[in-house]
Image (cartoon, coloured by chain):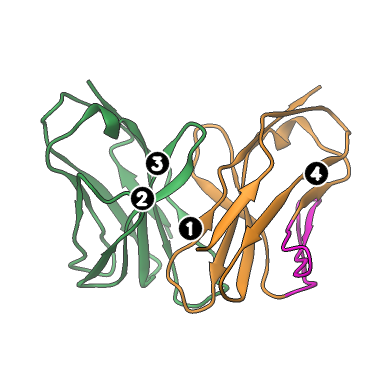
Chain colours: A orange, B green
Amino acid sequence: GDSVTQMEGPVTLSEEAFLTINCTYTATGYPSLFWYVQYPGEGLQLLLKATKADDKGSNKGFEATYRKETTSFHLEKGSVQVSDSAVYFCALLIQGAQKLVFGQGTRLTINP
Amino acid sequence: NAGVTQTPKFQVLKTGQSMTLQCAQDMNHEYMSWYRQDPGMGLRLIHYSVGAGITDQGEVPNGYNVSRSTTEDFPLRLLSAAPSQTSVYFCASRDRGAYNEQFFGPGTRLTVL
C-alpha cells in the first residue's frame, strides 16, 4: 500500500543552522507530494508541494525536490529561525485517490 | 472566508457518553475528512466524504459515525465514548483534483475519562 516514512524526531537545532528532514515514500501510482507544518496549538498548514518528478516546491525559505529515482522528498532550509519550531508532516496523494497519506511527523525545535 | 471551523475546541467526556464534533467549511469543497492525531502516530484518517450523501471509512473508523447531508457540514459522532478515543481531532477539506491543497480546522482536543 501507499505509505510515507519520515525521519524520527525530535530534532533540535540552533538558530541559523541548516535543516534537513528526510521523507521517503512508497506509492502504487504517481503521487503528488506535500509538506505540511503544524505550529503549537494549531491545525496543519500547507508549506509546499510538488506534483511531478524533479519539481521543486519552495516557500518561506524551505525547499523540497521530488526525486522519483530515490522515492524521496526531503525538506531543507538553509538557515532556520526560532519561529520555525513546529511539527512537520510529509504527505502524498495518488492521482485519482481521495485520501492524503501522512508520515508520522517530525517535531523541530530551534534554540536561540 | 472562515475556512474550516470546528467546535468545540476542548471537550471532556465520561466513558459511555455520546457527543458530536462539528465541522463546517465555506469554500464549497467536495472532499472532507476527519483525522485523529495521537503522539508518535501522526494523523490517522477516521472517515471521509467525497460529496453530500457520500461517506466512506478510513483507517480507524470503529467507534465513530459520520454523515454528510450538505456540502458545508461534516459532523463526527461518538456514540459511546471510550478512553482510547482521547485524542486531538482535525477536520479537513479540499477541492477535487490531485494537486489541491487540503485545508485543516484548528482541532478539537477530546479527553475521555
Look at label 1 and name its amino acid.
Phe
C-alpha span from label 3 to label 1: 12 Å
C-alpha span from label 4 to label 3: 28 Å
Q: What numbered label is drawn on residue A71?
A: none
Q: Which residue is the site of mark 1?
A: B103
N-terminal-most mark, 2 or 3: 2
Residue B86: % across, % down: 31, 30
Residue A36: % across, % down: 60, 51
Q: Do the residues under discs 2 and 1 have CB atoms within 8 angstroms?
A: no
Query: Of tags 1 and 4, which is closer to the observer?
Result: 4
Q: Please check the rendered image and state whether residue B102 is part of the magenta-colored stretch, yes or no.
A: no
C-alpha span from label 2 to label 1: 10 Å
Residue B35: % across, % down: 38, 49
Q: Do the residues under discs 4 and 3 have CB atoms within 8 angstroms?
A: no
Please say if A104 is above or below A40.
below
Query: Of tags 2 and 4, which is closer to the observer?
Result: 4
* Other residues around mark 3 within 10 Å, as few (<14) / some (14–19) / many (≥20): many
Q: Secondary structure at mark 4?
A: strand
Residue numbers of the magenta segment: A53-73
C-alpha span from label 2 to label 3: 9 Å
Q: Is residue A69 left or right of residue B58?
A: right
Which of these two is toward me, A21 or B62? B62
Q: Which residue is the site of mark 4?
A: A20
Q: Which residue is the site of mark 3?
A: B107
Same chain under badges 1 and 4? The reply is no
Look at label 4 and name its amino acid.
Thr
Q: Is residue A44 left or right of residue B108?
A: right
Q: Secondary structure at mark 2?
A: strand
User: How many numbered marks are there?
Assistant: 4
Please say if B39 is above or below B93.
above
Please say if B87 is above or below A92.
above
Q: Main secondary structure of the magenta part?
A: loop
